[in-house]
Image (cartoon, rainbow, N blue to C red):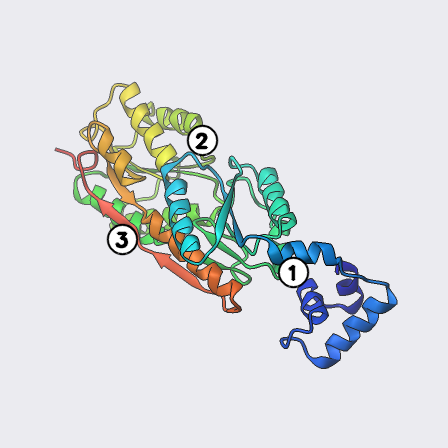
Amino acid sequence: MKDLAKELGVSIATVSRALRSSPEIGQEMQAKVKELAKRLNYRPNPFAQSLRKEAPRVIGVVVPNLVTHYYSAVLDGIEEEARKAGYSIISANTHEESDAEVRAIDNFISLHVEGIIACLSQNTTDYCHFEEISEMGIPLVFFGRTCLPEKFSSVTANGDIAAQEATQHLIDTGSRRIAFIGGPNHLDMVKRRKHGYLEALKENRIPIDRNLVVCDRIDYQWALEATVRLLQREDRPDAILAFNDIVTFAAFTAIKQVGLRIPDDVALIGFTDDAHAEYVTPKMSAIVDQSFEMGGEACRLLLKNINGDHQIYKKIVPQKLVIRETSAKK
């Protein structure tokens, strides 16, 4: 089908639909595709087709780090919606590696899943494998971290607004040198959360100190060491806004490791799940995702696409700021 599409200057999806005599493709194009297929001796594999028709209805899900509460809760939401629609789920954990993400997508294509839900790994900067998905007409929806917004629907959180509210709370409760510790700058999720943080500083006429904005990797050891370096500066921060649960608990550990008190010396708010925020002492002020709902919404959008709705949707599932003990200075 790739050869046919290339010669005719159309997409693989157009060729596939024309060969199936889909009403979405005009009669003239159907005739051109079928004539070229005949001339090139293209023959569908009836055995493979019969397997496809009898296969269980399966959705593939690609996540960067399945062991975190956020991704497991998103997966729960996807499974709940998929089950109601008669679908099963296959998940692939990329461990934040782009090569593993490419392999996962290739495997899902080979397995003939009916659609894919994906969250980018932190290392993904080349989106060719997703371009191919679009070209092949396979339904795909992104959640959390996204790319190619003109081609795919997505479900994201309002991280910019949540980060701005959290930073404002830190300012209102006495903090002035507020650091932001984040992941790779190319990720749209990092951009949104950093933007909200910077907007709060601007609105309160607090000068932006670039030394307090530290973005690199989503990795516990890196975040721990980065936080320690910040806290050992003479002009150390008196508060930290942390990008996600891995960074949040690394920062929490680092503050205690250097002998400072939370929140008296360094206040802390993290993007993390509600349950874990309750387990630590002092209890964590947190920006909480509605991750189960995010997974459900992503699955509902994918099912729409599978059922023929090709509109591109941008859904936002709001986050909640929960104030506890780590953020307000006494």
Q: Which mark is residue 135?
A: 1
Answer with left or right where residue 292 lies relative to residue 330: right
Q: Mark 2 sits on what residue?
A: 219
- Which residue, given by chain and number where applicable, does mark 3 sit on? 203
Mark 3 or 2: the one toward you: 2
Identified at 68% across, 68% down, the residue is 14
Task: Indicate whether 77 appears above or below 219.
Answer: below
Tell me the SS state at disc 2: loop
Quarter of the image with the C terminus in it: top left
Q: CA distance from mark 1 to mark 2?
A: 34 Å
Callout 1 amino acid: Glu
Q: Within 10 Å of the Cα at label 2, are there few (<14), some (14-19), or many (20+) other Cα atoms?
A: some
- The answer to whether one can see residue 155 in this image is no
Residue 306 shown left or right of residue 258 in the figure: right
Name the residue nearer the viewer: 55 or 172.
55
Residue 106, percent from left and from top: 64, 46
Q: Nearer the viewer, mark 1 or mark 2?
A: 1
Q: Secondary structure at mark 1?
A: helix
Q: Amino acid at mark 3?
A: Glu
Q: What label sits on residue 255 in the rendered view?
A: none
| Label 3 to label 2: alpha-carbon separation | 31 Å
Image position, residue 172 (x, y; %)? 17, 45
Q: Amino acid at mark 2?
A: Asp
Structural distance between the alpha carbons of marks 1 and 3: 44 Å
Which residue reaches farthest left?
Answer: 330
Residue at point 67%, 76% (across, down): 25
Task: Please provide percent x and percent y for residue 71.
Answer: 41, 42
> As rendered, which of 21 and 316 lies closer to the eye?
21
The disc, 3 or 2, on the residue closer to the chain's N-terminal end is: 3
Q: Which of the two residues, 49 or 77, is positioned nearer the viewer here?
A: 49
From the viewer's perspective, is 187 left or right of 227? right
